[in-house]
Image (cartoon, rainbow, N blue to C red):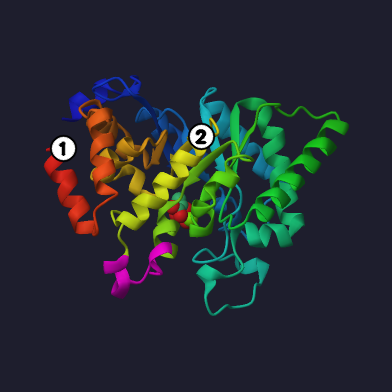
Amino acid sequence: QIAEWKKLRDEPTVSADGKHVELAANIGTPNDVNGVIDNGGEGVGLYRTEFLYMGRDKLPSEEIQYNAYRTVLENMKGKPVVVRTLDIGGDKELPYLDLPKEMNPFLGFRAIRLCLDRQDIFRTQLRALLRASAHGDLRIMFPMIATLGEFRAARDLLLEEKAKLREEGKEVSDSIQLGIMVEIPSTAVLADQFAKEVDFFSIGTNDLIQYTMAADRMNERVSYLYQPYNPAILRLIKIVIDAAHAQGKWTGMCGEMAGDSTAIPLLLGLGLDEFSMSATSILPARSQISKLSAAEMKEMAAKALQLSTAEEVAALVQSSVQ
Ligand code: PEP
Ligand code: MG
């Protein structure tokens, strides 16, 4: 099997009936890029920038960040790289920010909420990203967007920093795609409105499932509620993909679900354009997709959306793909 996967390393990802999708990787540091290339990644679908901020005693400078982003873009050699702006808070703490303890950190002051408040932190990151954009196919995405107002505010800060850099005579790409993570149900439900203003969506199922089911993703006692195949989750995913396509935009997924072999047939059937996963899952996923008919998976997904439980959905997938 491993030999079969290796042969697919430099091949595109195509279903048995000829539908193309993109398989990208999730990374946390510039060093992870080697693994992406070795495993045949067609891009980086999620660069989690938190690690740049963790494991040090103060904020990383614009220069430190610029070097990291530039390294990733250069080593990906023109392939798309989706960088997520700082997603701190919730389970990820930064001791030097000295933020007050919260009753519900996952529902609290985190990610874009913090960045829109601490503009000094956010603008530094945006400048580093904009400067790095001259070195590859950079795409920027904002985490934990709950309202269009948040997206617009973040976008406006980006545009301000871009204008400043241009005035300073710095090179900035003209074709940076700007997207959001869909990890909050309000944003999935309102995806048709968002789709008019963003260039792409990336569905963050790790959080989307947690917030939709109201089940802490870290709490084992409620893990029975953490159900990727629940039809409620599938319907939200469908809303997002359809809304993007209606506006000629693309939708990716960067939560764990994107690399799950039971979910992949459903996601292919729902029309997902990009699957971003841990690098080691890419070749098995490419192999799996090459044996699936996208047209058949579309019919199966339509049936799955009409089922009532996660167990029924999993059984349907098992009986449809074997
Ligand atoms: C997600 O929520 O699905 C996601 C990819 O982000 P993280 O796991 O970093 O919260
Ligand atoms: Mg998340």
Q: Which mark is residue 321?
A: 1
> Which residue is found at the position 28% from the left and 35% from the top?
298
Say the numbered circle drawn on residue 246.
2
The amino acid on which the numbered mark 2 sits, given as a three-letter code, is: Ala
Asked if residue 46 lies left or right of residue 60, the reply is: left
Q: Is residue 258 left or right of residue 102?
A: left
Picture quarter containing residue 57? bottom right
190 or 42: nearer the viewer: 190
Question: 247 or 61: which is nearer to us?
Answer: 247
Count residues near mark 2 (Cα–Cα under 10 Å), then give few for <14, some for 14-19, many for 20+: few
Residue 58 appearing in the image: no
Q: Can you tell which quarter of the image residue 318 is in?
A: top left
From the top left corner, tell me how far across and down residue 170 is, in percent.
Answer: 80, 30
Q: Residue at x 78, y 37 (%)?
A: 162
- Magenta-span inclusion, residue 119: no
Give the residues in magenta. Answer: 212-225
* Label 1 neighbour load within 10 Å: few <14, some 14-19, many 20+: some
Q: Position of residue 305 (x, y in %)?
A: 29, 49
**Alpha carbon of mark 2 to alpha carbon of mark 1: how far?**
29 Å
> Which kind of residue does numbered mark 1 sit on?
Val
Is residue 35 found left or right of 247 in the rendered image? Answer: left
Q: Are marks 2 and 1 in contact (CB under 8 Å)?
A: no
* Residue 25 in view, yes or no: yes
**Residue at point 39% right, 35% down?**
35
Determine whether the residue tagged by mark 2 lies in a helix, strand or loop. helix
Q: How many marks?
A: 2
Quadrant of the frame with the C terminus: top left
Of labels 2 and 1, earlier in sequence is 2
